[in-house]
Amino acid sequence: MKRKIIADVNIARATIEELKQQHKYMKDLMKLMKQKQSLAKAEFKRQKLSRKKGHISAQPDLKYGVPRFMVSPDLLF
Protein backbone atom coordinates (compact mmCIF):
# COMPACT_ATOMS: atom_id res chain seq x y z
CA MET A 1 0.00 0.00 0.00
CA LYS A 2 2.80 2.38 0.95
CA ARG A 3 4.60 1.77 -2.37
CA LYS A 4 1.43 2.51 -4.29
CA ILE A 5 1.05 5.84 -2.48
CA ILE A 6 4.69 6.72 -3.18
CA ALA A 7 4.22 5.78 -6.84
CA ASP A 8 1.07 7.92 -7.04
CA VAL A 9 2.93 10.86 -5.50
CA ASN A 10 5.77 10.47 -8.00
CA ILE A 11 3.30 10.31 -10.89
CA ALA A 12 1.57 13.43 -9.58
CA ARG A 13 4.91 15.27 -9.34
CA ALA A 14 5.83 14.25 -12.88
CA THR A 15 2.42 15.38 -14.10
CA ILE A 16 2.81 18.75 -12.36
CA GLU A 17 6.27 19.23 -13.94
CA GLU A 18 4.89 18.33 -17.36
CA LEU A 19 2.03 20.80 -16.94
CA LYS A 20 4.47 23.52 -15.86
CA GLN A 21 6.57 22.88 -18.97
CA GLN A 22 3.48 22.98 -21.19
CA HIS A 23 2.38 26.22 -19.53
CA LYS A 24 5.80 27.80 -20.12
CA TYR A 25 5.78 26.62 -23.74
CA MET A 26 2.30 28.05 -24.36
CA LYS A 27 3.28 31.32 -22.68
CA ASP A 28 6.35 31.62 -24.93
CA LEU A 29 4.26 30.72 -27.96
CA MET A 30 1.72 33.43 -27.12
CA LYS A 31 4.54 35.95 -26.76
CA LEU A 32 5.89 35.01 -30.19
CA MET A 33 2.43 35.21 -31.75
CA LYS A 34 1.89 38.68 -30.27
CA GLN A 35 5.25 39.80 -31.68
CA LYS A 36 4.33 38.37 -35.08
CA GLN A 37 0.97 40.16 -34.96
CA SER A 38 2.66 43.42 -34.02
CA LEU A 39 5.10 43.10 -36.92
CA ALA A 40 2.26 42.28 -39.31
CA LYS A 41 0.33 45.36 -38.18
CA ALA A 42 3.41 47.56 -38.64
CA GLU A 43 4.03 46.13 -42.13
CA PHE A 44 0.37 46.62 -43.09
CA LYS A 45 0.48 50.21 -41.89
CA ARG A 46 3.72 50.81 -43.81
CA GLN A 47 2.24 49.39 -47.02
CA LYS A 48 -0.96 51.36 -46.53
CA LEU A 49 0.98 54.63 -46.15
CA SER A 50 3.13 53.72 -49.14
CA ARG A 51 0.02 53.17 -51.30
CA LYS A 52 -1.42 56.50 -50.17
CA LYS A 53 1.76 58.19 -51.38
CA GLY A 54 1.36 56.52 -54.79
CA HIS A 55 4.36 54.24 -54.78
CA ILE A 56 4.36 51.29 -57.12
CA SER A 57 4.26 47.96 -55.34
CA ALA A 58 5.66 44.76 -56.79
CA GLN A 59 4.04 42.55 -54.20
CA PRO A 60 2.93 39.20 -55.65
CA ASP A 61 -0.78 38.78 -56.04
CA LEU A 62 -1.30 35.36 -54.48
CA LYS A 63 -4.83 35.09 -55.85
CA TYR A 64 -3.44 34.56 -59.34
CA GLY A 65 -0.11 33.05 -58.31
CA VAL A 66 1.96 35.48 -60.37
CA PRO A 67 3.52 38.83 -59.51
CA ARG A 68 1.42 41.72 -60.70
CA PHE A 69 2.44 45.33 -60.50
CA MET A 70 -0.08 47.47 -58.70
CA VAL A 71 -0.15 51.16 -59.41
CA SER A 72 -1.91 53.73 -57.31
CA PRO A 73 -5.07 55.04 -59.04
CA ASP A 74 -3.71 58.57 -58.58
CA LEU A 75 -0.89 57.79 -61.02
CA LEU A 76 -3.16 56.54 -63.79
CA PHE A 77 -4.58 59.93 -64.80
Image (spheres, helix red, strand yellow):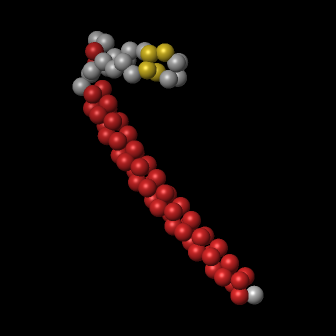
In the rendering, at what x and y percent does residue 63 appear?
Answer: 52, 23
- Quadrant (top left, top right, bottom left, bottom right) of the C terminus: top left
In the rendering, at what x and y percent does residue 32 appear?
Answer: 41, 49
Q: Nearer the viewer, residue 30 or 70?
A: 30
Q: Residue furthest left?
A: 53
In the rendering, at what x and y percent does residue 27 appear?
Answer: 45, 59
User: Can the viewer see residue 32 in this picture?
Assistant: yes
> Residue visible at 49% across and 15% down?
66
From what the image shows, is residue 77 above or below residue 28? above
Q: Nearer the viewer, residue 2 or 30?
A: 2
> Residue visible at 46% across and 21% down?
61
> Residue visible at 43% across and 15% down?
68
Quadrant of res 36:
top left
Q: Residue furthest front?
A: 3
Q: Nearer the viewer, residue 67 or 30?
A: 30
Q: Residue furthest top?
A: 77
Tally the marks: 0
In the rendering, at what x and y percent does residue 24 appear?
Answer: 47, 61
From what the image shows, is residue 28 above or below residue 17? above
Q: Residue furthest right?
A: 1
From what the image shows, is residue 40 above or below residue 13? above
- Quadrant (top left, top right, bottom left, bottom right) of the N terminus: bottom right
User: Can the viewer see residue 73 in this picture?
Assistant: no
Q: Is residue 5 left or right of residue 53?
A: right
From what the image shows, is residue 18 above or below residue 3? above
Q: Is residue 29 left or right of residue 44?
A: right
